[in-house]
């Protein structure tokens, strides 16, 4: 049986054990404050432990190993902090997009709205759910910092990676705002969509985790440069694949309803290309139907057909291929630990060749 790239060195299981230990300690802390916080512990355990590809810790770990870093449980636990930052971003993203599901389950804000309804509490259930999700996302952001510093690495080693971690969190938040902004303004430009893809997800999926690993290993500048050359285009390719899945993905694979990005009005690279290439009639349909929360199956099919007919889907697929090829060339520009080099190439395929 072939071991997946994320499972090499038993990494996925080790990351999940580190997350589970941390969450068990947090459950005790929350319960000591007030038993009413136990639903918070339950929700975050479910969200963090019952899903996720663990790609970010994998890129960070193998970036560390590629730069000559020695394996340790402390390194794995420290890099598991990336999963709490990912959880924070996703929980907040679902609130901003009014998404009802995540990974095939109710989104966190929907879970707490349901808790409110079932409990017969005062006020609007949806408002309570949104407020709870914002706070749970904030708590995950706090915990990302706590686990980073409590993973077991000595302060001097950890300090080398701190700037990368901080920059990553600022970039993602800025990218999230730009994503909201271009939806509000109706910005249809490919350049804006590319910038959002780069900062909202591209850099923090691959490049910044790799640079964190390199920093922890004390890697020379040449390794960091190669990791940036590999990670930035690969992260953009990862986001473009996500954009395709958001429109054409199988709900059984994506865990979200078919065409959800179309209902949310996402101004992705894929959609921006469709606007750029569409004729007057097709543009009118895009303007009218994109972002309609009541968009039904026939509406989704109509928008998908426009995206296909304009060549936007084919061009986005080609762009993924180009970006991935550029990333692999950059990885060839530096001598890495051979095992890590092999795994990083496998991770590149895992990040960009996901099933529909």
Image (cartoon, rainbow, N blue to C red):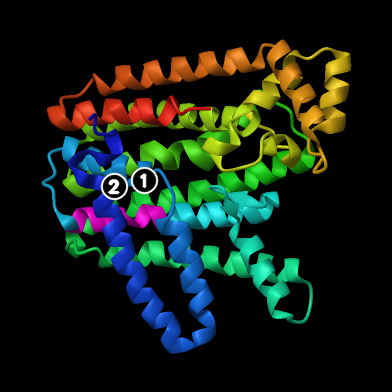
The residue shown at (26%, 40%) is 7
The secondary element bearing badge 1 is classed as loop
Q: Quadrant of residue 349?
A: top left
The residue shown at (53%, 63%) is 137
Residue 54 tag number: 1
Q: Is 78 colored magenta in this rendering? A: yes
Q: Is 159 colored magenta in this rendering? A: no
Q: Nearer the viewer, residue 230 or 342?
A: 342
Camera sees residue 222: no
Name the spot of residue 289 as percent of width and height, x first. Answer: 84, 32
| CB-based contact (under 8 Å), mark 2 and mark 1 | yes
Q: Which residues are magenta?
A: 74-84
Q: Nearer the viewer, residue 75 or 309?
A: 309
Name the spot of residue 319 as percent of width and height, x first. Answer: 52, 17
Lateral position of residue 96 relative to residue 72, left or right: right
Mark closer to the chain start, 2 or 1: 2
Give how far apart the Cα atoms at labels 2 and 1 are: 7 Å
Q: Nearer the viewer, residue 146 or 299?
A: 299
Lateral position of residue 59 relative to residue 288, left or right: left
- How crowded pointer 2 is (Cα within 10 Å; few <14, some 14-19, many 20+) is rated as many
Name the spot of residue 251 as percent of width and height, x first. Answer: 60, 37
The residue shown at (28%, 25%) is 345
- How crowded pointer 1 is (Cα within 10 Å; few <14, some 14-19, many 20+) is rated as some
Please name the residue that numbered disc 2 is placed on.
12
Question: What residue occupies the far front of the structure in this picture?
Answer: 1
Lateral position of residue 36 relative to residue 27, left or right: right
Q: Is residue 45 above or below residue 224?
A: below
Name the spot of residue 47 as percent of width and height, x first. Answer: 48, 58
The secondary element bearing badge 2 is classed as helix
Camera sees residue 67: yes
């Amino acid at each position: 049986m072939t071991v997946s790239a994320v499972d090499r060195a038993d990494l996925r299981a080790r990351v999940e054990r580190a997350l589970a230990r941390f969450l068990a300690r947090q459950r005790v802390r929350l319960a000591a404050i007030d038993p009413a916080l136990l639903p918070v512990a339950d929700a975050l355990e479910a969200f963090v432990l019952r899903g996720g590809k663990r790609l970010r810790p994998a890129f960070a770990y193998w970036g560390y190993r590629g730069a000559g870093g020695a394996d340790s449980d402390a390194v794995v636990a420290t890099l598991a902090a990336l999963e709490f930052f990912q959880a924070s971003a996703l929980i907040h993203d679902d609130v901003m997009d009014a998404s009802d599901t995540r990974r095939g389950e109710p989104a966190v804000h929907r879970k707490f709205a349901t808790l409110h309804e079932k409990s017969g509490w005062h006020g609007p259930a949806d408002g309570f759910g949104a407020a709870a999700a914002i706070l749970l996302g904030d708590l995950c952001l706090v915990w990302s910092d706590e686990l980073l510093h409590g993973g077991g690495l000595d302060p001097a080693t950890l300090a080398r990676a701190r700037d990368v971690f901080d920059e990553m969190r600022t970039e993602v938040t800025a990218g999230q705002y730009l994503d909201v902004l271009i939806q509000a303004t109706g910005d249809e430009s490919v350049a804006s969509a590319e910038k959002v893809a780069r900062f909202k997800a591209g850099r923090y999926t691959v490049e910044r985790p790799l640079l964190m690993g390199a920093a922890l290993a004390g890697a020379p500048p040449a390794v960091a440069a190669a990791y940036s050359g590999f990670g930035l285009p690969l992260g953009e390719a990862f986001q473009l694949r996500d954009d395709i899945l958001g429109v054409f993905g199988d709900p059984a694979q994506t865990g979200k309803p078919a065409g959800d990005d179309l209902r949310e009005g996402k101004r992705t690279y894929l959609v921006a290309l469709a606007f750029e290439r569409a004729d007057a009639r097709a543009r009118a349909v895009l303007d009218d139907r994109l972002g309609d929360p009541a968009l039904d199956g026939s509406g989704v099919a109509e928008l998908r057909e426009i995206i296909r007919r304009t060549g936007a889907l084919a061009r986005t697929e080609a762009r993924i291929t180009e970006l991935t090829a550029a990333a692999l060339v950059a990885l060839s520009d530096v001598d890495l630990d051979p095992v890590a080099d092999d795994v990083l190439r496998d991770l590149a395929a895992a990040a960009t060749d996901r099933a529909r």
